[in-house]
Amino acid sequence: RGEDSLFDLDKLEPIIKSNFNEFTDRELGDLFEELCLTYLIPRKISPSMPSSDTICNLIPRLVMTDLSDKSALRVYDPTVGLGFLLSRTSMLMTEALKSNVKFVGQDIDGDKTLFAYMNLCMHGVKAKDIKLLIGDTLSTDLLPDEKFDAVMVDTPLALRWEPKEELEDDPRYQILGRVPSKRSADFAFVAHA
């Protein structure tokens, strides 16, 4: 909210409810994603590209093969961005598995996190089933003790990062024997997931 926000969310909700009630959650969600791609990405409001349709369809299908017997699931995306991967996961998992799915995500960009929340809501995910956090997932693990049934991530490849000295003792990077170099965060994302 505030002077610099793109729109007032309190005004948006009644518009959606009154004008779009004949659309399914999936249709509304797809519309929201199309608007993001058409208006946000070209204007550099979101400097990184969202996950492709291929990735958004493939990753949840791969993960679902091992989760078919669960009645409740917790899914985590440590680089949630605009929420395209989680929103597609919500559609595929709730349709195929008929499970209660909780979605958890983290992103360094607070604006993207807000759009991810809206994206999930537009796809019919209830607010109680969404937990999105703002923070650098590689430097600060905001969920160190939480367990998930699935971790889905489309990492930003070849991302440069500045690892801090205190990360030397971070258990996430112990599997590698050391904190990955600042040249590329690829291995850091793999160790974190």
Image (tube, helix red, strand yellow):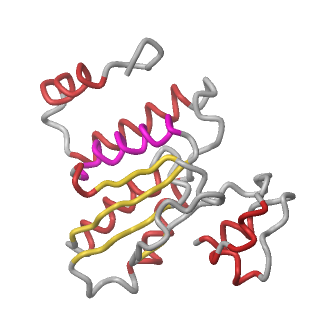
In the image, residue 116 above or below residue 65: above
In front here: 136 or 61? 136
How far across and how far down the image is residue 169, in percent? 70, 74
The residue at 80%/76% (across/down) is: 178
Q: Nearer the viewer, residue 20 or 76?
A: 76
User: Quick check: 115 above or below 164?
Assistant: above
- Residue drawn 24% across and 66% down? 95
Residue 110, percent from left and from top:
50, 38
Q: How many marks?
A: 0
**Residue 118 in the image, given as x and y percentages of width and height:** 34, 39
Does residue 76 lie above or below 8 as drawn? below
Q: Residue 142 magenta-drawn?
A: no
Residue in the image at 24% along x and 23% along y: 10
> Residue 69 or 145: which is nearer the viewer?
145
Task: Please say whether residue 120 is one of the residues in the magenta stretch.
Answer: yes
Q: Position of residue 103 (x, y in %)?
A: 35, 60
User: What is the quadrant of residue 99 in the picture?
Assistant: bottom left
Q: Is residue 134 left or right of residue 72?
A: right
Q: Is residue 167 found left or right of 134 in the rendered image?
A: right
In the picture, the quarter occupied by the N terminus is top left
Most distant residue in the top direction? 3
Residue at 26 percent of width and 87 percent of height: 69
Which residues fall within the magenta stretch? 110-125
Where the C terminus falls, by quadrant? bottom right
Left or right placement of residue 94 versus residue 143 in this view: left
From the image, give the main secondary structure of the stretch colored magenta.
Answer: helix
